[in-house]
Image (cartoon, rainbow, N blue to C red):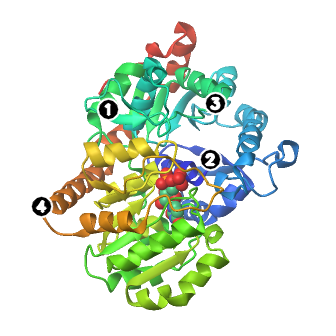
Amino acid sequence: MAQGHMIPMVDMARLLASRGATVSFVTTPVNAARIKPVIDGASDAGLPIRFVEFKLPCEETGVPEGCESFDLLPSVNFYKPLFEAISMLWGPLKLYLKQAKPRASCMIADYCNWWTSEVARELKLARLVFHGPSCFFLLSSRNIHRSKVYESVADEHESVVVPGLPQRIEITRAQAPGWFFEWKEMQERVMEAEEAAAGVLINTFQELESEHIALYIESTKKMVLPIGPLSLYNKDAKSKATRGDKASVEEHQILRWLDSMEPRSVLFVSFGSIVKMRPLQLIEVGCALEASGRPFVWVVKEAEKCAEVEKWMSEGFEERTRARSLVITGWAPQVVILSHRAVGGFVTHCGWNSTLEAISSGVPMITWPHFVDQFLNERLVVEVLRIGVGVGIRVPVFLPEEDRVEVGRGAIESAIASLMDGGEEGDGRRTRARELGEKAYKAMAEGGSSYENMTLLIQFPMEQAHNDIAEKGGADAYCHHH
Ligand code: UDP
């Protein structure tokens, strides 16, 4: 129940339904309200999806009423209660599945929802895990965890080489601590639930990270299906514009502004749904954008736009950049913007959805990771795919209390200059990004690798898979090789 997880799963549900599967999408009332236009659109299109809402036990767990997604929580102190509230949905889920007609043949659960494993086992239902992040991240963290490589370094800021990758990639423990690193119990449950699953679906595509996918299959001995980029399921402007939430600016307004700009001249700046910048850092970004002299679309969250920021914006910034800026306060229709030909660069926090959306649009990136999987995604973008320029951050920042500048305007400005400027290096990055965008499109089109994986998924004998795994007591029973 976070935008970065909901959005691709909703795309996946619609894609499955459009390919002939009957889908029940389980969520909670606040999350369903956010995607009301998507739900209506699916019903108008005659897609066989039922959106099922379970009430989240907020009161019982201390989650503030209405805060049913991680971005809505007032502080990190509510993260654990929200996980607990979500896990309490096992009861309603089990009941629903018991009564569902026709009987479900398979359950697809976000990897965070470890508790679905028990429900699936009791109901003798095949269960697949859906992973939102890159396979590069999944493989790296798996290898780091299994090799215990961090145990050899005392300092969490000392670099180690990620074992078992085809490339030499260095990372620090602070940058890639692993899922739920502080919550050992939850980490173990998530890993157990993944081991017990009949297979793994990943929002990526074969041509993007084929070596890492092959190594991940070898390591997990599971059916692993790359089925993305799922955002490409949205073809028209309306379905792109309604992903995740209602956009705070009408899409035609944005399109009109982008249409008036030169191709590949605009920088798009947005940090996903969870990162919230404090005023000093936010203003530093604004100063760099102003100094860059380039046109930009900048997404500032409601929660970031405090009095200090508003004052700074109205005292000159807006005036000076008016002719070449579009500042969106609130939720932006990100894929509408990224897929417009005027956009030539993306300043991103390297959340995997954002990264993959940029790749799908052939847009190179300035990488500014903050936490969880983002530093490893940055390594993939900058060092392996070579379609990004790092802003130079080394130490993760997770919803900081303290208001201070982590990345100065000079560093941001020089990353912008290097990404957007002509020259051999910039051209190379742009060409590689464009080629990957074409491959992404082909992967999702009829006959493409992700399209065929989706066919395989729908035709897969799920009941059989479940029984075999239950009988043989291990996921080794089902090992799919491409
Ligand atoms: N997003 C959006 N509008 C916004 C902010 C985010 O549409 O104003 C979407 C974005 O396109 C992506 C998702 O929200 O699909 C964010 O997921 P990501 O994995 O990039 O980052 P997270 O939010 O999980 O940190």
What's the amino acid at mark 1? His
Instruction: Please indicate whether residue 9 sits to the left or right of residue 263 in the image.
Output: right
Q: Is residue 47 above or below residue 252?
A: above
| First in residue order: circle 2 vs circle 4 | 2
Q: Is residue 357 above or below residue 84?
A: below
What's the amino acid at mark 3? Trp
Report helix, strand or loop for mark 2: strand
Total numbered labels:
4
- Tell me the quarter of the picture where residue 102 sits: top right
For the C terminus, the quadrant is: top left
Q: Which residue is mark 4?
A: 424
What's the amino acid at mark 2? Phe
Q: Nearer the viewer, residue 408 or 229?
A: 408
What's the amino acid at mark 4? Glu
Where does the image place residue 104, in percent across and percent down from the top left?
Answer: 61, 34
Residue in view at x 27 percent, y 32 percent: 168
Looking at the rendered image, the disc whose residue lies closer to the viewer, 4 or 1, is 4
Are the residues at dot 4 and dot 1 in contact (C-beta closer than 8 Å)?
no
| First in residue order: circle 2 vs circle 1 | 2
| First in residue order: circle 3 vs circle 4 | 3
Where does the image place residue 194, in percent across and percent down from the top left?
Answer: 54, 26
| First in residue order: circle 1 vs circle 3 | 3
Where does the image place residue 45, in percent across and percent down from the top left?
Answer: 52, 62
Q: Which residue is mark 1?
A: 212
Q: Which residue is mark 3?
A: 114
Q: Which residue is mark 2?
A: 25
Distance of mark 2 from mark 3, alpha carbons? 17 Å
Distance of mark 3 from mark 4, alpha carbons? 47 Å
